[in-house]
């Protein structure tokens, strides 16, 4: 399943570098944005297989960005995983309700990151196969 392009939207340089290095080491291509606005533009133009979205960003936040992505035909199908410093159960519920496909608590665990990314990509691929099957 490697080789897919993954968009990282993260304003913290250290986190961005960690996520980029881990994904590239595991064979993924990366696209990077330091703000949600920039990330939305890249999602539209490059159609990544997955977006990793920090929640606290300069300008619009990750939850607002998710709703904009879901509101557009060209980006609504792209799975989005939240990157969040908050692991409180209230926040987890809020993230789930917002419609994220998963979340990654910070500090980021390299092993968890890789397994969650793989799982979301497999789920997305399976969902698109199912859709094709029912349309026939
Ligand atoms: Mn941030």
Image: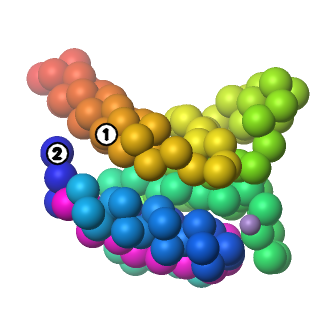
Residue 4 screen position, x and y as percent? 24, 58
Q: Please say whether residue 130 is visible from this viewpoint.
A: yes
Q: Please state if 79 lies on the left or on the right of 11 as rendered.
A: left
Q: How crowded is mark 1: few (under 14 residues within 10 Å), some or many (20 or more)?
A: some
Residue at mark 1: C-beta within 8 A of ligand 1: no
Residue 75 screen position, x and y as percent? 47, 57
Q: In the picture, which quadrant includes the C terminus?
A: top left
- Mark 1: which secondary structure? helix
Residue nearest the viewer, comparing 78 with 20 = 20
Residue 37 screen position, x and y as percent? 66, 77
Region of the chain picked out in magenta, as a range: 27-37
Q: In which quarter of the image is ligand 1?
A: bottom right
Residue at mark 2: C-beta within 8 A of ligand 1: no
Residue nearest the viewer, comparing 67 with 80 = 80
Q: Please say whether residue 128 is visible from this viewpoint.
A: no
Residue 41 screen position, x and y as percent? 53, 77
State which tag comes first along the sequence, 2 or 1: 2
Number of on-image labels: 2
Q: How far apart are marks 2 and 1 (CA)?
A: 8 Å
Q: Residue 22 carries which label?
A: none
Task: Tell me whether the residue at label 2 lies in contact with that at label 1, contact meaning CB atoms closer than 8 angstroms.
Answer: yes
Q: Residue 1 carries which label?
A: 2
Query: Where 133 falls versus 59 (above or below)?
Result: above
Which residue is painted at 65% across and 51% down in the image? Answer: 107
- Mark 2: which secondary structure? loop
Residue bearing the label numbered 1? 118
Residue nearest the viewer, comparing 94 with 134 = 94
Query: Where 73 falls versus 103 (above or below)?
Result: below
Which residue is painted at 47% across and 63% down in the image? Answer: 19
Which residue is painted at 76% across and 69% down in the image? Answer: 57
The answer to which quarter of the image holds residue 92 is: top right
Q: In the picture, which quadrant includes the N terminus?
A: top left
């Amino acid at each position: 399943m490697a080789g897919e392009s993954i968009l990282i939207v993260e304003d913290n340089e250290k986190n961005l570098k960690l996520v980029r290095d881990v994904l590239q080491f595991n064979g993924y291509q990366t696209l990077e944005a330091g703000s949600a606005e920039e990330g939305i533009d890249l999602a539209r133009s490059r159609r990544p297989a997955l977006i990793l979205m920090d929640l606290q960003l300069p300008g619009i936040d990750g939850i607002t960005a998710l709703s904009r992505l879901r509101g557009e035909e060209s980006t609504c199908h792209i799975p989005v995983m939240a990157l969040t410093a908050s692991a409180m159960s209230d926040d987890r519920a809020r993230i789930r309700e917002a419609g994220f496909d998963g979340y990654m608590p910070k500090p980021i665990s390299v092993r968890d990151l890789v397994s969650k990314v793989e799982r979301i990509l497999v789920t997305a691929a399976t969902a698109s196969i199912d859709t094709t099957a029912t349309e026939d």
